[in-house]
Amino acid sequence: KQEVTQIPAALSVPEGENLVLNCSFTDSAIYNLQWFRQDPGKGLTSLLLIQSSQREQTSGRLNASLDKSSGRSTLYIAASQPGDSATYLCAVNDYKLSFGAGTTVTVRA
Amino acid sequence: DARVTQTPRHKVTEMGQEVTMRCQPILGHNTVFWYRQTMMQGLELLAYFRNRAPLDDSGMPKDRFSAEMPDATLATLKIQPSEPRDSAVYFCASGLEVGWTYEQYFGPGTRLTVT
């Protein structure tokens, strides 16, 4: 069974600082990895999907990398803003999603 | 703006009652997933449909849960009888095929409380 871990569980940074969120998984034979954002009491918003053949994906201030050999993915958020405060979840996507527990980010104004 | 819709958004019921949750996937998506989120277990897959056929329901307690997709615009998740341990947020997601997988788009969830 795929185990997905996200450390740290919570992170607080001042506005403008770059964010680095980590995700590790146990089975490197993954198909794809997907990053989500969840606001309190809300559903999940897909941020980036990295397919198995790719090493990274970018969207605006977000960049996600995938290193299958080491079982890691990293989400970078440049120049953080208070609106980036949310819980960020990574999930191994082999048609169904296996989620980590998430990292709750607080960006202080 | 295409979105997954779920009804009801909130449901409070008594133990033993039947609960039905509904999901309308994004038009054109041929896969539907049901997930459950709790503080203790996080997000877990309950069931998965492709082209309205159930492909994986291994995460679902079979004795009380059932999932169906009567047509391409409606998926249902039913619990009968409900128990307090079923209290959770239930998410539906529809999938857009990308390469060998599906990029999943989540609905807002149904928050279920069983007393």
Image (spheres, coloured by chain):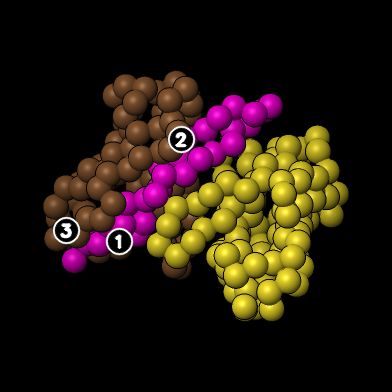
Res. B86 in view: no
**Which chain is yellow in the rendering?**
A
**Mark 3 belongs to which subunit?**
B
| 2 and 1 marks in contact (CB < 8 Å) | no
Q: Does residue A81 lie above or below B70 as drawn?
A: below
Tell me the element at label 3. Answer: strand
Tell me the element at label 2. Answer: loop
**Which chain is brown in the rendering?**
B
Q: Which residues are magenta?
A: B86-115
How dense is the environment of label 1, judged by Cα within 10 Å: few (below 14), some, or many (20 and up)?
Answer: some
Which circle marks residue B87 in the picture? 1
Asked if residue B105 lies in the magenta stretch, the reply is yes
Where is residue B2 shown, x and y percent of the image? 45, 33
Q: CA distance from mark 3 to mark 1?
A: 10 Å
Residue for point 29% across, 24% down: B70
Asked if residue A57 lies in the magenta stretch, the reply is no
What amino acid does circle 3 point to? Thr
Which residue corresponds to mark 3? B13
Where is residue B93 shown, x and y percent of the image? 46, 40
Res. B100 in view: yes
Which circle marks residue B1 in the picture? 2
Q: Between residues A80 and B108, which one lies in front from this camera angle?
A: A80
